[in-house]
Each structure stands twice: as structure tokens, then as C-alpha cells.
Image (cartoon, grey):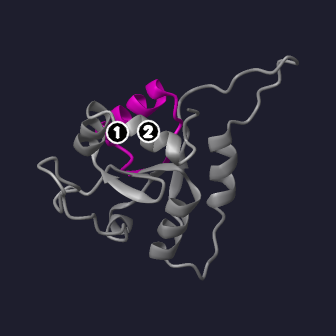
């Protein structure tokens, strides 16, 4: 699974007083988390990434819904880690939880993009927007430390 790769958040890091760009927390964590252990399976690597990042999105490289997810989270003040998966890696994502409401989880037909918050699968864009509109997204982000309360 050496094709697993990370994307930046498309937001330039703030400049320090000496005008030297500073690394964002997401970039620093992503660099460390994507260290490859040749013996680590694709499934184990994905589980590790989910556990190491408070907010992580798995996507395909050409997914416009991932861009919308990212923009929603950035607007709230969260900078998610975004991992682009190849088609053969998508099958290694953990299965979604059964939908608790009519909003549904991840469809088996289109499992990405998918967002995990605090190690729990939220689902796709529809589930993320439903969580936000219900007023539960921000408290969940604060709870996992992805957003200051």
C-alpha cells in the first residue's frame, strides 16, 4: 500500500513574526503517521491512521465531495487529515456502522469519501452535513480535541 498518500488542506500556514512559515499541526502529524512499515498491512495502517488523527477523511484523488467535506470542516475551524486511497485500498476501510436514522452511513456502492471523528465512522458527506445541521458536529469535534470549546 505504498500508494497511500496524504493531501494538504490547501490553506497556507500562518507566518511567524520572523516571516518563516510554520508547520501546521496537521502537516506535522501527517508526516509522522504516514511512516511506512513494510510489514504493516493496509488494514492495520488505515486503523492506525484513524486512531492517530482526531478528524480524518479517506477519499479518492478526484472526489469533489471530499472537497466539500474539507471546506465545511475548515469553515468550522477544523483542519482534517485527508488521505487519498487507490481503488484497491478502499476495500480495506472498516465497514460502516449500521445507520441509526434515515440519514444513512456509507453506501456500499460509493464508500468514499468517508470521515472519521475521534476514531468513529461518521460516514459520507450526507452524514456529516446531517450531523452539523442537527447541532451535534461541533460538540463532537470539541470532545475529540479537534476544536477548542
Residue 21 among magenta residues: no
Q: For the residue carrying disc 1, how many other residues have a C-alpha within 10 Å: few (<14), some (14-19), or many (20+)?
A: few
SS at circle 2: helix
Residue 30, placed above or below residue 49: above
Quarter of the image where one finds residue 94: bottom left
**In the rendered image, which quarter contains the C terminus?**
top right
Q: Nearer the viewer, residue 61 or 59?
A: 59
Residue 69, placed above or below residue 143: above
Q: x%, y% of residue 84? A: 44, 52
User: Which residue: 48% across, 66% down?
Assistant: 46
Q: Are marks 2 and 1 in contact (CB under 8 Å)?
A: yes
State left or right for residue 76 relative to residue 66. right
Residue 63, placed above or below residue 88: above
Q: Nearer the viewer, residue 53 or 139?
A: 139
Quarter of the image where one finds residue 66: top left
* Outermost left residue: 102
Q: CA distance from mark 2 to mark 1?
A: 6 Å
User: Which residue: 28% across, 64% down?
Assistant: 96
* Outermost bottom residue: 39
Q: Which residue is mark 2?
A: 139
Residue 1 visible in rendering: no
Badge number at residue 86: none
User: Which residue: 62% across, 25% down?
Assistant: 12
Quarter of the image where one finds residue 34: bottom right
Q: Nearer the viewer, residue 149 or 26?
A: 149
Please state the extent of the stretch shown in magenta in the rendering: 58-82
Q: Which residue is mark 1?
A: 136
Q: Nearer the viewer, residue 132 or 79?
A: 132
SS at circle 1: loop
Amino acid at each position: 500500500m505504498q500508494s497511500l498518500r496524504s493531501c494538504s488542506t490547501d490553506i497556507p500556514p500562518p507566518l511567524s513574526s520572523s516571516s518563516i512559515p510554520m508547520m501546521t499541526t496537521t502537516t506535522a502529524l501527517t508526516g509522522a503517521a504516514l511512516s511506512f512499515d513494510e510489514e504493516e498491512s493496509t488494514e492495520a495502517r488505515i486503523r492506525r491512521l484513524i486512531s492517530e488523527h482526531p478528524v480524518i477523511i479517506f477519499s479518492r484523488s478526484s472526489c469533489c465531495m471530499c472537497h466539500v467535506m474539507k471546506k465545511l470542516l475548515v469553515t468550522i475551524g477544523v483542519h482534517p487529515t485527508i488521505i487519498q486511497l487507490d481503488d484497491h485500498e478502499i476495500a480495506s476501510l472498516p465497514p460502516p456502522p449500521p445507520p441509526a436514522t434515515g440519514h444513512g452511513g456509507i453506501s456500499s456502492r460509493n464508500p468514499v469519501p468517508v470521515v472519521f471523528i475521534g476514531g468513529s465512522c461518521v460516514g459520507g458527506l450526507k452524514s456529516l452535513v446531517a450531523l452539523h445541521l442537527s447541532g451535534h458536529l461541533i460538540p463532537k469535534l470539541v470532545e475529540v480535541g479537534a476544536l477548542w470549546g
